Amino acid sequence: MALLPMLIAKREVCCCLRAKTMFYDTPDHDTPESHEAQRAGPFWCAITQSLIGPDGKIAGLEPCRGSRSCCRME
């Protein structure tokens, strides 16, 4: 499984965060090297369909956490 869906399932990041790796699967998605590469993005917000979230800040693995005003952990 790709890194982002795992983090969303664990409620570690906003469920509206998106990355291209969510939409395809490869045999190497579970390797440590692949997870490290997936941390780089690119990411976007599903609400705004942009790299900027509803609060005007950049979307990404680190910024889109529970402390952010627009974060949804559904």
Image (tube, rainbow, N blue to C red):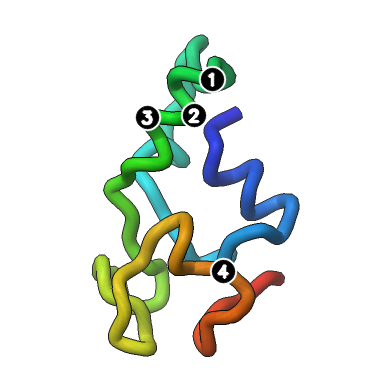
What SS does tag 4 mark?
loop
Residue lying farthest to the right in this orientation? 10
Percent coordinates x, y for residue 55 in the rendering: 37, 89
What amino acid is found at the position of numbered circle 2 in the picture?
A: His
Q: In the picture shown, does residue 47 fall above or below 28? A: below
What amino acid is found at the position of numbered circle 4 in the picture?
A: Arg
33 to the left or right of 32: left
Residue behind mark 3:
37
Other residues around mark 2 within 10 Å, as few (<14) / some (14–19) / many (≥20): some
Other residues around mark 1 within 10 Å, as few (<14) / some (14–19) / many (≥20): few
Percent coordinates x, y for residue 56 in the rendering: 29, 86
Residue behind mark 1:
32
Task: For marks 2 and 3, give the CA distance.
Answer: 5 Å
The numbered mark, 3 or 4, whose residue comes first in the sequence reads 3
Task: For marks 4 and 2, give the CA distance.
Answer: 18 Å
7 to the left or right of 27: right
Task: For marks 1 and 3, give the CA distance.
Answer: 9 Å
Other residues around mark 4 within 10 Å, as few (<14) / some (14–19) / many (≥20): many
Residue behind mark 4:
65
Task: For marks 4 and 1, give the CA distance.
Answer: 22 Å
Location of residue 2 (image quadrant): top right
Disc tally is 4
Q: What number is the disc on residue 35?
A: 2
The numbered mark, 4 or 2, whose residue comes first in the sequence reads 2
